[in-house]
Amino acid sequence: MKNITDTIHRGRKTFSFLLAAIVALAAAGADVEQRVEELLAKMTLDEKIGQLCQMLGETSAAAMAGDISVSVRGKRLLAEIRAGKCGSLLAHPGKNYNKLQQAALESRLGIPLLVGGNIIHSANTCWPIPLGLSCAWDEGLWRRVGEAMAVEARTLGVNWALGPAVDVALDARWGRIAEAAGSDPLLNSLMAAALVRGIQGENMADGRHIAACAKHYIAYGAAMGGRDYNAVEMSDDTLRDVYLPPFRAAVEAGVATVMPAFNSYNGVPCSMSRYLLTDILRGELGFDGMTISDYTAVEECTDAGHGVAEHGADAAAKALEAGMDMEMVSRNFADGVKDALASGMLKQETVDEAVRRILRVKFRLGLFEHPTIDFAALNKSIDYAAHYDLAREAARKSVVLLKNNGVLPLKKGIKIAVVGDIANSRREMFGGWAGTPNTNSRNTKLIDGLKADGVDAIYSRCYNLNGKVDEKALKKAASKADVVIAAFGEYEHENCENNSKARIELNPAQRQVVDILATTGRPFVAVVFSGRPLAIPELAQKASAVVAAWNPGSAGGLGVADVLTGRAEPWGRLTIDFPITTGECPKFYFRPTTGRPSGTRLHGPRWTSRYRDVPETSVWPFGFGLAYTTFEYSGESARAGSGEVVFTADVKNTGGRKGSELVQVYVRDIMAGTVRPRRLLKGFERVELDPGETKRVEIKIPVSALGYTVNGKYRVEPGVFEAWIAPHSDAGRKLTFSLAPEK
């Protein structure tokens, strides 16, 4: 009884605290709205137009280190800011941030600047690329990384992260697959929310957090052929079920800003789609922050690109009326708003509402109270050593062990040959959008990490990833070692924006290395550094072990080495399939069922929906990842109850080492109103087990999560469902459960 009484008492105290917090937040919100309206009433049209414009600032290291007022361009920029013609800068201005803000404060109304930077996975410290980070399946880690990135971004003079990217990406040919959380809507949503909460904190104005920007809205990852910037054609129902959930999660997490994507959606550029920017984003999702175009995306709607608007007034009117609030770099808003208003193409209230949204973000950021930064105090307050430790944790949790015939973890006392140019490069650990981490002296490369972990390792270059292979040197290195660790993959400049590929297989040089190593008689471990899943069946067949290391960041050398040596148990699990060949792309685990699936009873195996020359399965499927031990599932069950379905399984560590297993739940609606995926991730839970230990895992899924969209309406249908409690998306014993009709 005492426990019940204590619980009730704590509940009352919690309720009182929450009520007080809600009242305080409402009061703060009301104060912001009042201040926005008071400032808006004082603004001239020119000043309003200025707020709609983001200008390109100085971003070079020289500009950051020097005085922005010295160069001709810098003087011109400061003059524009003082004249109130700039609401935001795209820059990493460093200590020049204060000079830029001072210029803004000298304008007639003293409105401070938003300073946006591409803080994707890096500031001073570089964390793994988002695709790699997603493989940790760890919301707490994602949030901590967001918090560390935010406070470090402030040291670069950035108060607004133009990230996270929350694009669901199904096609490995697309370069920007490196920037988001893989192919699954649920996992993307969880990572989006965690990063937004980490970057913005509970209070963006606390001096250690900044505004976040969810991008690229929307369906950017579905660009035709995996070609960047390309068109997207799909049903609205697919949009809502697959590509919208991460943006919904970001909005629910309080994201301050959203960036529309470069692509068109069903014939209309996202930058000028009222349906996307107003009807869905603001109307359905309830977003009350500001939108900003991607780099020159408004200009790209003119005859220079999409061809749906004329430069200037027409482009400005169409973008603003659709729901775009700020234009990045190009000048249609600056040059065209007055003419658009005069001609009647644009309404004054539309301009006012856009300015209102921009001011709201600036007030919420606390820029009016604290427009400048005390850089000395800020740097002193940051525990960079802790951030580096976090980067090491993130790197090792992002590593996915894909194959292991027993060579890993590396045994103590053996001699290791490390080959391949990437294994001896710090820069190649970073990946695209890495910013300025090359200035950090603690950055490590793979050979550094191995030696730091006490491995007797000797590095020999032997080959470049895309260049000449020194066969003699490679064989010599292998002959002197017990195990060879060979770096494969792609260079960091080959991923992220505008790095789509028609071929994602290993190039001839790397295939030659695989063949040579396979004949040396020495086991070799393939460590794959990349910004995308690669088609690497050769490594699956011929390597003794394969490790997906992605671009693991500043502490990547240490983090990857921690896994190779067994200092850390393998943790990561794939968030996207590894295909057999490029021609299968896009290949993703939740592909819709067809009238002729594998195992069909209608026509036999010959007449199914498949390629003749490759198996239907992936080399490694979504959710896959090995440990240094083995696990066994038993007693799986699925039970539908009141408002939820409870999935349970007994998971046993059947090996000789302590290990971590990621238990995943997949569901299929087998009789639905529209074609459904073969299976779809609905939940997961990590369990750590000692050798021989068994734990019961229970995962509860709300019934409301089992629905789908039909003609724009979300619904959950009664009937029979199939389910799998499994270690990855191609495994598990099939279960069934039923949802009863609503009474």
Image: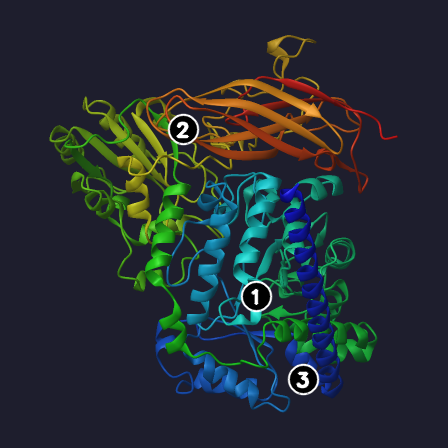
- Label 1 crowd bin: few (<14), some (14–19), many (20+), radius 10 Å: many
Residue 163 appears at what percent x and percent y? 54, 58
Between circles 1 and 3, the one closer to the viewer is: 1
Between discs 2 and 1, the one toward the N terminus: 1
At 29% from the left edge and 41% from the top edge, which residue is drawn? 562
Residue 499 appears at what percent x and percent y? 47, 49
Question: Which numbered disc covers residue 47?
Answer: 3
**SS at mark 3 in the image:** helix
Which amino acid, mark 3?
Answer: Glu
- Label 3 crowd bin: few (<14), some (14–19), many (20+), radius 10 Å: many
**SS at mark 1 in the image:** loop
Between circles 2 and 3, the one closer to the viewer is: 2
Do callouts 2 and 3 mark residues in contact (Cβ within 8 Å)? no
Q: Looking at the rendering, which quadrant does residue 520 occupy? A: top left
Which amino acid, mark 1?
Answer: Ala
Between residues 158 and 204, which one lies in front from this camera angle?
204
Which amino acid, mark 2?
Answer: Leu
Question: Which numbered disc covers residue 436?
Answer: none
Question: Which numbered disc covers residue 626?
Answer: 2
